[in-house]
Amino acid sequence: MTEGALLSVVVTVLNEAGTVGELHRRVVETLGDRPFELIFVDDGSTDGTFDALRVICAADSRVRVVRLKRNFGQHPAMHAGLVRSRGTQIVTMDGDLQNQPEDIPKLVAALARVDVASGRRIDRADSVGRTLPSRVINGLLRRFTGVPISDFGCAFNAYRRDAIEPLFPSIGKQKFTKALVLASGASVEEVDVAHAASRGGSSYSPIRLVRLALHVVVGFWPQPIQWIGLALGLICSTAAAVLAIYGVIYWIDQSNFPGPLFAGTGIVFVLGVEGFILALIGEYLGRIQRDVENRPLYAVREEL
């Protein structure tokens, strides 16, 4: 990895009119004379983000802007930037300044040794309601990918082009780009990066975090329905046997078997489990529908 190699910095933004100017300035100051391109992907902003990007692009020929027709989500937006990148080294980051542009050289330096420089957020400035689900998702991804890194959710990473480019067709459909690349066998090194508090607050609601967890299970755990079905069969069969034995003993001893209570408890338990299975099936069906319809991941309104 030579200093003269073109570096692509891909940034996804959503309603970040107040930060894109500062982000551009800090990237330029950090990279200095190194050849680079800075690609902003506006994921359907409704404030003045695109107008601010237009001004930046007009003043700096190294800046390119992709404007999507609506908000398609962070991962499709990242795909829009990645497929337009031209560098042999690619850095991905969010545009809300939680990621510090000054850490870009550390990530790029690690590419001299490995295929992927994985950002690891230190002193993470998020609430417990955000970090606790993130730990659960990280644990699932470590288990399913077999890659022992600590922060799959950090979007601030660097990739060698030859490691990530073969996976462009899958990126965007799969919500964890880094996990997808690492699961393909790419070598990785974790790099500590600073993490600031979000100026606009987290956009990840509890429901969205649960959906991400389901996406991890479906995307990285082979045949989860079979495994869950087997586990549920054993658990439910065992529970039914225990309740039956207890019921017989209680009936003989007390001459009054509390059937409605146990029946109601069993029904509620089974219904709860079935709900989780249906959620998994729904994720599968959604993927099948998208593949059958062959719908695009996003639609571009304008490019600068």
Image (tube, rainbow, N blue to C red):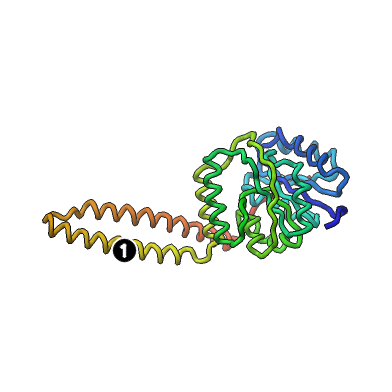
Which percent across, then down, holds residue 84? 76, 54
Which percent across, then down, holds residue 304? 79, 45
The total number of labels drawn is: 1
- Image: 237 above or below 208: below
- Image: 65 above or below 255: above
Residue at coordinates 23% horizontally, 51% vertically from top-left? 261
Q: Is residue 183 left or right of residue 139?
A: right
Return the residue nearer the eye: 64 or 252: 252
Find numbered disc 1 in the image and state the secondary structure of the residue it sits on: helix
Which percent across, then down, holds residue 255? 11, 56
Is there any visible trace of residue 37 in the rendered image? yes
Q: From the image, tell me which residue sits under label 1.
A: 238
Which percent across, then down, holds residue 141? 57, 57
Residue at coordinates 26% horizontally, 52% vertically from top-left? 264
Is there any visible trace of residue 12 in the rendered image? no
Return the residue nearer the eye: 142 or 15: 142
The residue carrying pointer 1 sits among few (fewer than 14), some (14 to 19) or many (20 or more) residues within 10 Å by Cα, namely few
Q: Amino acid at mark 1?
A: Thr
Residue at coordinates 52% horizontally, 47% vertically from top-left? 133
Q: Quadrant of the N terminus?
A: bottom right
Q: Is residue 69 left or right of residue 205?
A: right
Q: Is residue 159 left or right of residue 236?
A: right
Classify residue 20 by image quadrant: top right
Q: Residue furthest left?
A: 255
Classify residue 239 by image quadrant: bottom left
Return the residue nearer the eye: 7 or 256: 256
